[in-house]
Image: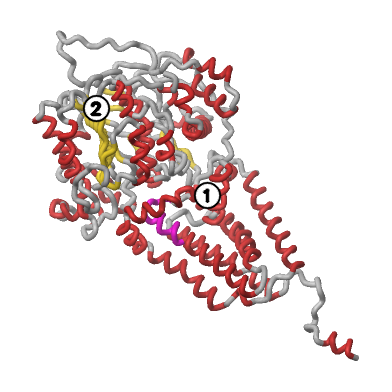
Amino acid sequence: MKLMEKVKLKPPNFTPGKAWLRTENLWRMTFFPLIILYMELILRLWNHQPFWGVGLLYIFLFSIGAGLVCNLLASIGKERLRYVLHWTVMVTLTLLFITQAVFYTVFRSYVEVSAIALAPSAISGFFLESIRTIARAIIPVILLLLPLVFFHAFRIWKKRPVRLLELNRILIITAALHVLIISSIMISTAGLLPLRAIYRENFTLNLGVQNFGLVTAMRLDIRYTLFGRPMADLSEVGYAVLEEVPDPEPPPVEEDYEEPDEEEEEPEIPLGYNVLDIDFAYLIENETNAERLEMHEFFANRRASSRNEFTGMFEGYNLIWILGEAYHTISIHPEVTPTLYRLSQEGFIFPNFYTPDTGYSTTGGEFGTLLGTIPTNRNAFAQTANKYMPFGFGNLFREKGYETFAYHNHTHTFNSRHQSHPNLGYPWVALGSGLDIPRIWPASDVEMAQATVDDWIGADHFHVYYLTVSGHLEYNFGGNNMAARHRASVEHLPYSTAAQAFLATQMELDLMLEYIIDRLEAAGRLEDTVIVLSGDHYPYGLTHAEIEELRGPLAEPIIDVHHSSLIIWNVNMEEPVVVDWYCSFYDIMPTLANLFNLPFDSRLVIGVDLLSGLDPFVPFATRSWISQLGRFNSRTGDFTPHPHIDPETIPEDHAQQMVHRFNILETNSARILAHDYFRIVLGNR
């Protein structure tokens, strides 16, 4: 009788192991998948990514898998432990999505796990901008906080824990789902940028979020940060051996600058190539490291740029090299920025110049500009601090007997420039390390020039590098001192407030140039000084619509928004020299090295001398690219010939060869730093 009573105490209709998952746990196990899917969709909508497509399907599937894993992690132990685990998972997810939504609102890209260490300095350096950015992203922030409210209301952690048998079954389902998803990705090899490549060798956080969702993209980012990213297949890339390269065709230029007087003797420029004496045969024969062996073989057989009629055109001249914060084609306005307008119409003119997205904001654009090499992580510039950098322009000009200088009107330690730039040959002077100007935000470019010109203008030969900050976002008249300073000069223009404020910030750069030119002219140094100006990135503080106010329609925004301006100017060039190549800031360093006849090896630089006849290539962090025949949009997967190119004349495998070219250039850019490669091939010079 007692035995029967005990049996009756069991829950009705309970048969151990009969159901795969109790109804109560089945409902609970859908909670985290639904929460993750909800957050992924909010992020996708807010960041204006293409909503429909195969990426949405994978986000749905990966959200289920990731949610099941979160449920499993949070469902073990007693109620107190489950309480802690559930809240830990929820808060982590919420902070992850809010952080990325806010970061993307400003930088139009997501922040990698490798850059988390930079967050404190970024927030302290741009505190007000961080607050304003959160305010701009208030809608997704609120929407992403809502799940916490529902989570607390339903008290999921109080439900009965998952039994061991149920746990095993959920693990089987989760593993099977993951295998199914990954298998479908691995067999997806169609197109120029297949899903398999995005998941592996061509992975970037931006592409990962677009195609797989933030949670999966962050998982991959952590994995590749810790263990390295799979290598691209480089077996189909062909290289022309240096000795077999025919004389290059002249570049598409119009040479109309003033010829020197007949009495003046022109320096004889040796013919040949811009290369250094590197015994690659010896290196290949004695190399034991597989990656370095591949590097030796690649660089030994890579086309070098030809020395040409422009080689040494500015030899013995002084160089002022300016990297302008957010400087862009839309910075140039005949009335508001007359100096920029004048210089953009004179000297060398590059109508097809781009500042391609690197994914790393200013530090990425600066890295590509100064070194002519692709940055493959946000810390790339900081990593150069303990590497041998013989092609740093400060080092190259010092070898020529020049005095070198570098200035920045922001914090001297930001992005570790106080360590990287001295290694490039520049004494680093910025706020906190010798630059005495008012500490306002953003600081004044004109005041930086006024405080520093006397340092260098009396030197026999000088090379000066300026990194400006006046053009920094936010573009408004309330919190941007440079915009407010010049408001009266732009508020009559028929543009929105943000567009007007942007032009106002660029006025400060324009006035800086005007001041420098006036001082050079007064000192009799203008004729022997070259001024170079480009931007670090497009002004991402403006929306596409606001950019279109200033420059007209963007036919293909993901690419066209990066179309910019490069100035290489000397007052002696009475007529412009137009260079029609599709090019980018990666090509500035080798072009200048050739113009100043500086010793460098063009095989070791990813960019090309734009006057040598070699065709440049414009790579974007989004895996889009521009060749001389057309452009590839990674979002749409489409290759489009340039308007002036007859599609029938494009080789059938051109687009695929450009994909291979992208892979090999990016791979070797990363390896140069990883192996301290310049020290290996040039360190004993």
Q: Which amino acid type is shown beneath numbered disc 2?
A: Glu
Residue 144 position, x and y percent, is 47, 66
674 relative to 6, above or below: above
Mark 2: which secondary structure?
Answer: strand
113 relative to 3, above or below: above
- Whether residue 324 is visible here, answered yes or no, is yes
Residue linked to disc 2: 403
Front in this rendered view, residue 457 or 50: 457
Part of the protein shown in magenta:
98-109
The C terminus lies in quadrant: top left
Horizontal side of residue 537 vs 43, given as left or right = left
The main secondary structure of the magenta stretch is helix
> What residue is rendered at 17% in x and 35% in y?
453
- Whether residue 468 is visible here, answered yes or no, is no
Query: Between marks 2 and 1, how big is the CA–CA gap?
Result: 46 Å
Q: Which amino acid type is shown beneath numbered disc 1?
A: Gly
229 relative to 174, above or below: above
Mark 1: which secondary structure?
Answer: helix
Is residue 104 found inside the magenta-colored segment of the image? yes
Front in this rendered view, residue 367 or 266: 367
Q: Earlier in the sequence, mark 2 or mark 1?
A: 1
> What residue is rendered at 46% in x and 44% in y?
622
345 relative to 19, above or below: above
Is residue 131 found inside the magenta-colored segment of the image? no
Residue 618 position, x and y percent, is 41, 35
Of badges 2 and 1, nearer the viewer stands 2
Q: Which mark is residue 598?
A: none
Residue linked to disc 1: 208
Horizontal side of residue 225 vs 596, given as left or right = right
Residue 332 position, x and y percent, is 22, 42
